[in-house]
Amino acid sequence: MDGFVKMVAIRSTELVRRGCEIQKTTPNATAAFGRCLTAASMMGNMQKVENGSMTLQIRGGGPIGTITVVSDYEGNVRGCVTEPNVPLMEKYPGKLNVGATVGVDGTITVIRDLQMKEPYIGSVQLVSGEIGDDVTAYFAESEQTPTACALGVLVDTDCSVKVAGGYLIQLLPGAPDEVIDAVEKGIKNAGAVTKMLESGMTPEEILTEVCGDLGVLFFENEPVCYKCYCNRHRVEAALISVGREELTEIMSEGKAFPVECQFCDAVYRFTPEDIADLLRKI
């Protein structure tokens, strides 16, 4: 209520389910990828630059390889992972080891397209591979914004996504010590975000729980989903960019050439005649 704290929360269960279904992830990859999708959705939504976008990329040296997630300005996301088939790794029975899945020998990189001449790119060293800690560290180091990020993806016994979501809290300039103390106390008292999500709490209820006595004023509620912006025209442009020599080789094989989008399950098929048309455009 006092204007010193900005926050956003999300129940991302359905968009995480969709993304993991497309990428065909195993449980450890589901947890890591789902956390990235959740974080990117909130970060993109907070950016508030119409037609802008935000890319979150994590390279930690772990078995999942590189995780890349892109959010639009509303918070709709799409993403992919290098290796979706990660073997089961647990901290203890029933608790997936996301940090070991991602690794810590690498960086978290954020690319913000703010509809200006050049995108803003920030990159910092990973601190835990747990994603939430790394997002927190990124904001502190790269954007000098005190931030708390909590993310949770609960994978069910049948390997499906049971619940997913999280919250992102940022202190604005001039926040007094008593507000900072209240936020820190609220985060501690609220406990793990996964338990709140599993109990059925809404994003509004989660933020109210975390903020305690501070009081929360909600400005908007935005529906978001897993959303890919691929289309045939964009795929054609990508094929043209590979050059005349490679397209000629594809055409000479005399059979249909399928192009699968890395972010969704769309497949675009190009006949030799289609490739010939692209060569004429070149």
Image: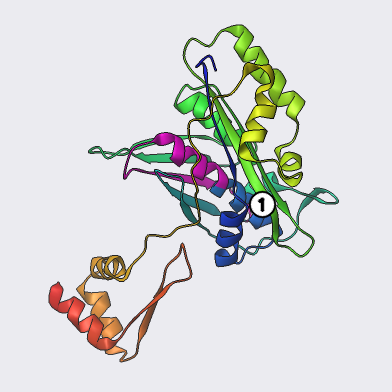
Image quarter in which the C terminus is found: bottom left
Q: Which residue shows up at 24% across the image and 81% down it?
A: 275
Image quarter in which the N terminus is found: top right
Q: What range of the chain is rendered magenta?
A: 38-63
Please provide percent x and percent y for residue 190: 74, 29
Position of 263 compared to 118: left or right? right
- Viewer-closest of 28 and 149: 149
- In this view of the protein, can residue 133 be seen by the observer? yes
Q: Which residue is farthest bottom?
A: 254
- Viewer-closest of 21 and 141: 21
Q: Is residue 191 magenta?
A: no
Say what amino acid the circle numbered 1 marks: Ala
- In this view of the protein, can residue 122 be seen by the observer? no
* In the rendered image, the vertical position of residue 46 relative to residue 213, given as above or below: below
Please provide percent x and percent y for residue 233: 27, 68
Position of 99 compared to 218: left or right? right
